[in-house]
Amino acid sequence: MHPRLYNTLRYALIVVCGLVLAVPLLFMVSGSLKSAQEINAFPQPLLPETPIWQNFADAWNYLTPQVIGNTFIFSLGIVGLQLLISLPAAFALAKIPFKWTAVILTTLVVPMFVPANLTLIPLFVVTFQLGWLNSFAGLIIPMAAQCAFAILLFRQFFVTLPPGLIEAARIDGAGWPRVFTSIALPLAKPALATFCSISFLTAWNMYIWPLVVAPNPAQRVINVALAPLAGGENSVISPAIGLAGAVIAMVPVLIVFIVLQKWYIKGVVGTGLE
C-alpha cells in the first residue's frame, strides 16, 4: 500500500474512533442544556433549541462547595497516603536485595484478585470498631491501605533504573534514603503522574464506600450527592439537571488530567517501550 494512502486511512480511522469515543461526552454536555421535554423526546434533538443554563444552577444546589471540597480531601488524601506508603516500599523491593522479596511480591499480588465487594463488609466492621464512621479517617485510610497496585507499579519502574547509577551513589557514600530521595524519586515523575491520574480518578468516582461509611452531609462526596439527580421512574428532577451535575463533577478530573497530561503520556509511552 502506498505510504500516503496508508497514512490517510490511518488518520481517518483515528478520527472516526475519536468521534465514537466522544459521543457520550457530547451527549452529556448537550443534554445538560436541554429542557425535560427535549430530553424525553424521540428522536432526541442533537442540540438544545434554547440552552437552559438554569440546569447548572439547579445542579449546584446539590453539588455545593462543601461537597466539592470533601471530594478533594477524600481523593487527594487517598493519593497522598498511597504515595507515602508505596514509594519507599517499591524502591526497597526493587533495589535493596533481601531473600523475602518474592514472598512479599506474591503476597501483594494475591489480594488484587479478590473482588472489592467481598472486602466491603470486613472493612466496614473494622472501620466501625475503630469509631471512624462519618469521618475522613474512615473514608480515606481503608482505601489508601489498598495500595498493592501502586507498589507493584512503582517497583516495576524502579527495577528499570540502571544499577550503575545506584552503585555509583552508594560508592560515593549515599545511604539508601539519600539514593531514594535524590536519585530515584526525581526520575520517577512519569510513573508518579500516571499513578496520580489513575488513583485520583478512581477515588473521585467512588460511590459505594463513601455512601456506606460517611452518609453524613458533613463528609458527603460528589457521587453520593449526585445520586438524587440520577432520576428514576417517579423522580420529579429533570434528567437534564442530572447531566448538568455530571458535567460539573467532570471538570476537576479534566483539570487534573490536563495538568498531568505531559507526564502521564511519557509514563504510558515509556512503559510501552520497556
Image (tube, rainbow, N blue to C red):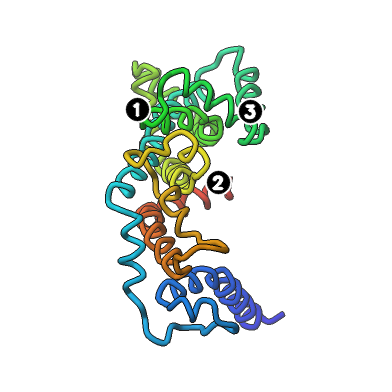
Residue at label 2? 271
Q: Are marks 1 and 3 in contact (CB under 8 Å)?
A: no
- x%, y% of residue 51? 36, 81
- x%, y% of residue 132? 40, 24
Q: Are marks 3 and 2 in contact (CB under 8 Å)?
A: no
- How far apart are labels 2 and 1 at the CA level? 22 Å
Report the quarter where the N terminus lies.
bottom right
- x%, y% of residue 103? 64, 17
Residue at label 1? 181
Q: Specify the amino acid type for callout 2.
A: Thr
Q: Specify the amino acid type for callout 3.
A: Pro
Between 177 and 163, the one lying in front of the other is: 177
Q: Residue at x 32, y 49 (%)?
A: 68
- First in sequence: mark 1 vs mark 3: 3
* Residue 45 higher or lower than 158, as above or below: below
* Residue 113 higher or lower than 64, as above or below: above
